Image (cartoon, rainbow, N blue to C red):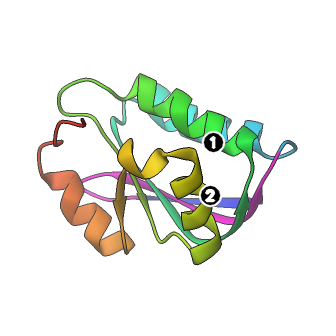
Amino acid sequence: MDITTTIHDTAAVLSVTGRVDALTAGDLEGAINGRIDRGERKIILDFTRLAYISSGGLRVLLATAKKLHNEGDRFILCGLSIEVQKVMNLAGFTAIFSICATPSDALAAAKEPAKPRP
């Protein structure tokens, strides 16, 4: 797995390449927590080049969502492949997370106030 971070006016975009599994989930969590520790409260995960996500990766997503729950915080996923989208659907995460088709869409959504989740 490789993570590239790009800082924009509206959010930090972490582009994840490869696989998030039991061996790499901690690296993803560390990268996300590093951004949060720097005071960045708008995080976008670009999964355009993500081939696979395990339950360990899903746990990282949930932990991040719990940290970014205040007004003004945003946590957005984007660029989900068909395979990753299936995992998100099966786990019920499509009802929990903000998901956009592209990084550009996610950056635009990061400017808007968060919509309440059911």
Please tell me whether the stretch drawn in magenta is mainly helix, strand or loop.
strand
Whether 49 is drawn above or below 20: the answer is below
Query: Which residue is the site of mark 1?
Result: 58
2 and 1 marks in contact (CB < 8 Å): yes
Query: Residue 48: percent from the left, percent from the top?
Result: 55, 74
Query: Which residue is the site of mark 2?
Result: 87
User: Looking at the image, which residue is at 30% across and 73% down?
Assistant: 104
Within 10 Å of disc 1 (Cα), the crowding (few <14, some 14-19, many 20+) is some
Q: Secondary structure at mark 2?
A: helix
Whether 57 is drawn above or below 90: the answer is above
Task: Judge from the rendering whether residue 14 lies leftward or rightward of residue 84; answer left or right.
Answer: left
Residue extending farthest right? 23
Q: Where are the magenta residues, as a range?
A: 7-21
Quarter of the figure with residue 87: bottom right
Residue extending farthest left? 113
Q: What is the number of the mark on residue 30?
A: none
Quarter of the figure with the C terminus: top left
Which one is in front in this view, the residue at disc 2 or the one at disc 1?
Answer: 2
- Is residue 81 or residue 48 the one in the foreground? 81
User: Looking at the image, which residue is at 27% across and 63% down?
Assistant: 107
Magenta segment includes 16: yes
Magenta segment includes 117: no
Spatial distance from mark 2 to mark 1, Cα to Cα?
A: 9 Å
Query: Residue 63: percent from the left, percent from the top?
Result: 54, 27
User: Looking at the image, which residue is at 31% across and 26% down?
Assistant: 69
Query: Residue 93: percent from the left, percent from the top?
Result: 48, 46
- Is residue 2 or residue 22 the one in the foreground? 22
Q: Name the kind of residue labelled 1 in the image.
A: Leu
